[in-house]
Amino acid sequence: MRLERMSWKDCEEYFKNHDMVILTTGSTENHGIHNPLGTDTMIPNKILELVEKQSDVLIAPTLPYGDADFHTEYTGTISIGSDLLEMVMERISDRLYDCG
């Protein structure tokens, strides 16, 4: 069950009986000349597809940015650094916690 596909009422109903949300992150960074920049997001998204088929746990959208400062020399890398990544994940987690 994907958070981005739910109405706020559906979400409210979910949190009446559940308290788990899967929150994933990946990065947009270099993976050699043969792999796409979104490899680190594509992998968890595929795993989440499999989880979704076998579970009723709520899945939040994958955050496609991470700490990739070590790859910034490669065109297309988008790094938000470790401090901002931690703050964003904490904020998302806090908000989800507030939901129930």
Image (spheres, helix red, strand yellow):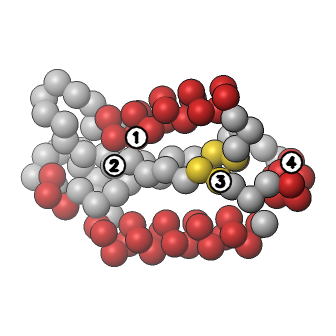
> Which quadrant of the view contains residue 96?
bottom right
| Local secondary structure at mark 1 | helix
Q: How crowded is mark 2: few (under 14 residues within 10 Å), some or many (20 or more)?
A: many
Q: Looking at the picture, does residue 8 appear above or below residue 99? A: above
Q: Which amino acid does label 3 sit on?
A: Val
Q: How far apart are marks 2 and 4 (CA)?
A: 29 Å
| Local secondary structure at mark 4 | helix
Which mark's residue is nearer the viewer, 3 or 1? Answer: 3
Which callout, 2 or 1, points at the residue further toward the start of the chain?
2
Q: Which amino acid does label 1 sit on?
A: Thr
The residue beneath circle 2 is 27
Single out the residue that lies furthest toward the left: 73
Tell whether label 1 touches label 2 (CB within 8 Å): yes
Q: Which residue is drawn at 67% across and 28% down?
A: 54
| Local secondary structure at mark 3 | strand
Q: Which amino acid does label 2 sit on?
A: Ser
The total of numbered circles placed on residues is: 4
The residue beneath circle 4 is 10
Residue 41, disc: 1
The residue beneath circle 3 is 21
Q: How far apart are marks 1 and 4 (CA)?
A: 26 Å
Coordinates of residue 21 in the picture (x, y in percent):
65, 53
| Local secondary structure at mark 2 | loop
Which callout, 3 or 2, points at the residue further toward the start of the chain?
3
Q: Residue at x 86, y 54 (%)?
A: 17
Does the rendering let one see residue 8? no
Which mark's residue is nearer the viewer, 4 or 3? Answer: 3
Q: How far apart are marks 4 and 3 (CA)?
A: 14 Å
Viewed as shown, does residue 21 lie left or right of 17?
left
Q: Residues within 10 Å of mark 4 (few under 14, many from 20)?
A: few
Q: Tell which of 82 and 76 is nearer to you.
A: 82
